[in-house]
Image: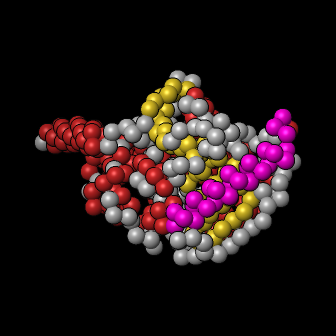
Amino acid sequence: MAAELALGLILAAAALALATAWRARAREAAERRGHPPEGEFVTVEGVRIHVVVRGQGGPGVRDLVLIHGASGAARDYTFALAGQLAGPYRLFIPDRPGFGWSAPAPGREALADQAALVAGAVAALGAEAPVVLGHSYGGAVALAWGLAGGPAALVLLSAPSHPWKGGMPLFYRITSTWWGQRLAVPLVSAWVRKATLRDAVAEVFAPDAVPEGYARHFGPMLSATVGVLRLNARQRKALKAELKAMVALYPGLSLPVESLHGTADEIVWTSVHARPLAAAVPGARLVELEGVGHMPHHARPGAVIAAIDRAADRAAARAVAVPADSTGGQGGGQAGGRATGAIGPAAGDARLR
């Protein structure tokens, strides 16, 4: 009897594992069919990167790179913001390695590695000294890129920049472990309800409303694939230590930095990240958006576009004032003001506070 029971349990577990693997793959395939690539592919150091390019270069046109956050993809920007930026900017909107339609980069998942791969991809497509915007986790990638040198200016939206007190939420504590990566992640990917994903998107936007049609355009299930869930967990686990190592380098940033952060952001706290960064970086200007949550590029696109324009104008003025061969991502420093207050008309980072 005991042997029969054990055999039954083994067969049931095997059946569940097979069903889970099949369902996870089928759900991802279906979501990909409904959300095909919007851009083109370029291979950088053996990694195939998907980049959406909008606009044409020419006199008066500035190159702008938009980097998405955790659980994100280029589609977060192509939903609305990319169309609103058409004209004075040539846009380069990559899927970070392992997200959207970009291939993963095993062993090169750190902030600096991602920045280097994204920089290589957009450079291969013609971007020169771009203004780099990063949202949430993508803001940390943008900071790493700025520290390495290359961008003309940074625009940071709801970006983590400093280590925070406490550990990781339970979900990441589970999914970042060896067992969680191999057991919990496939189960979540295969069986999570679509309503749960919609609720997760709403939580990222809160207290702002999710724009009509956003979920259909973005495809939340692409943020819940086995590969993305595993990658998110690993990157989230490493983020605190990576930011801790970067903090001492912030005073050396000499490029213009425009930072926007909602006062109602419950995912990345202004007091822990945006304000200390504004105090540390000589060329940083912080605008706090009253009552806005984690997704200012959807809730207050006018304020975001104004920040991009300011960053581009400051970069152009700096290029005239400082000879090109004497500038870099670090060193020197350009003093900048700091503004606070509301101006103008983010699925899945864990709370970083």
Q: In this view, does 155 lie to the left or right of 191?
A: right
Q: In this view, does 43 lie to the left or right of 325?
A: left
55 w.r.t. 267: above or below: above
The quarter of the picture where residue 260 lies is bottom right
Expressed as whole percent of the image width and height from the top left, the position of residue 102 reads: 45, 35
Q: Is any part of residue 40 visible from this angle?
A: yes
Q: In this view, does 315 lie to the left or right of 23?
A: right
Q: How many labels does the image show?
A: 0
Residue depicted at 83% across the width and 54% down the height: 334
Magenta residues span 300-325
Expressed as whole percent of the image width and height from the top left, the position of residue 39 reads: 43, 36
Residue nearer the viewer, 31 or 311: 311
Q: Is residue 239 magenta?
A: no
Residue at the far front: name it.
59
Expressed as whole percent of the image width and height from the top left, the position of residue 335 reads: 83, 59
Expressed as whole percent of the image width and height from the top left, the position of residue 107 reads: 56, 32
Residue nearer the viewer, 273 or 157: 157
Question: Which secondary structure dominates the residues rendered in magenta?
Answer: helix
Q: Is any part of residue 248 visible from this angle?
A: no
Q: Which quadrant of the figure contains the C terminus?
A: bottom right
The quarter of the picture where residue 322 lies is top right
Residue depicted at 48% across the width and 55% down the height: 84
